Amino acid sequence: MASSENPKITLHWLNRSRSPRILWLLEEFGVPYDIKIHQRDSSTNRVNPTLKDVHPLGKSPVITVGDHTLAESAVIVEYLSEHFAPSLIPAKWKPECEGKLGGETEEYMRYRYYMHYCEGSLMPLLVVLVVSSNVESTAPDVAGKINAGFLHPNFEVHFAFLEEQLGSAPGGGPYLCGSTLTGADIMLAFSLMVIMSELGDRGLGNLKQETHPKLLAHVELLKGSRSYMRTVDKMLELDGESQPQGVYRLW
């Protein structure tokens, strides 16, 4: 838990962004934090330029902690977990292997991989999905080729991979890295919730209960957490019920 001597954490909130992932993490920690709102332009959906006063790229999520400004989801999750919830980071070394190349535990190596897999490999598919959805009404043939030739086979590969990984989790799971929650689970669950909301009934990737029961159960497990439920309530306070459906909606 944070002490009175710790600098205040400020989450710079942008609606329809990845910032709910960090809000969820902070709610999981139960530490004090402030929120500064930077809403998108309602007519253009462009990011509020005030975010560039926080970080030159004007992207979200971004947090400030004392003199530090941290951007990128994995960096933020790792940094905050180290300070406030080391239990969300698996033990790094096997017995008598500290500092040895290859001496890391399977749990830790999974954690490090998935912290970066979500943004490096999985979420870029969402960007293509959004582009395909945007051109579907004006260029359905183009969207169809993107969906059939690129998105469908790639989502199939990723969903099958994640189903297998959850099935082979240390100790039988139910989390990515074993029997306890890690920051990687929040990273993945958020990514999957967003992707699933955008996939809708398109059938891309064949994500179904019959073929991916462990993957869908992982999402439901995380959605059932108290920290997630508090996050949903906070989002309603921040954006209101009029928040548009679509990209980066958490529920």
Image: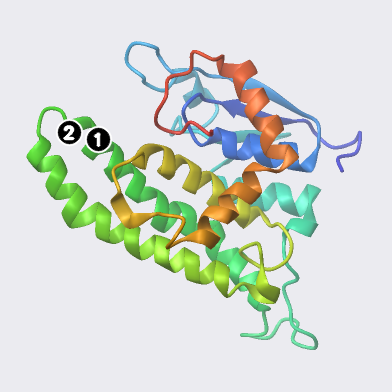
Please state if 90 lies on the left or on the right of 140 as rendered: right
Cα–Cα gap, marks 2 and 1: 5 Å
Residue bearing the label numbered 1: 133
Q: Identify the residue position indicated by label 2 in the image.
A: 136
Q: Are marks 2 and 1 in contact (CB under 8 Å)?
A: yes
Instruction: Identify the residue at horizontal 56%, vertical 49% (top origin).
Output: 189
* Residue 109 position in % (x across, y down): 61, 72
Which is nearer the eye, 65 or 146? 146
Q: Residue furthest front?
A: 210
Q: Is residue 12 left or right of residue 126?
A: right
Given residues 103 and 121, the one toward you in this image is: 121
Reply above or below: 242 against 193. above
Q: Is residue 170 visible?
A: yes
Mark 1 residue element = helix
Q: Quadrant of residue 150?
A: bottom left
**Between 130 and 221, the one nearer to me in the picture:** 221
Examine the rendered structure and indicate whether residue 194 appears above or below residue 81. above
x, y percentage for residue 184?
61, 56
Name the secondary structure under disc 2: loop
Q: Amino acid at mark 2?
A: Glu
Q: Quadrant of the N terminus?
A: top right
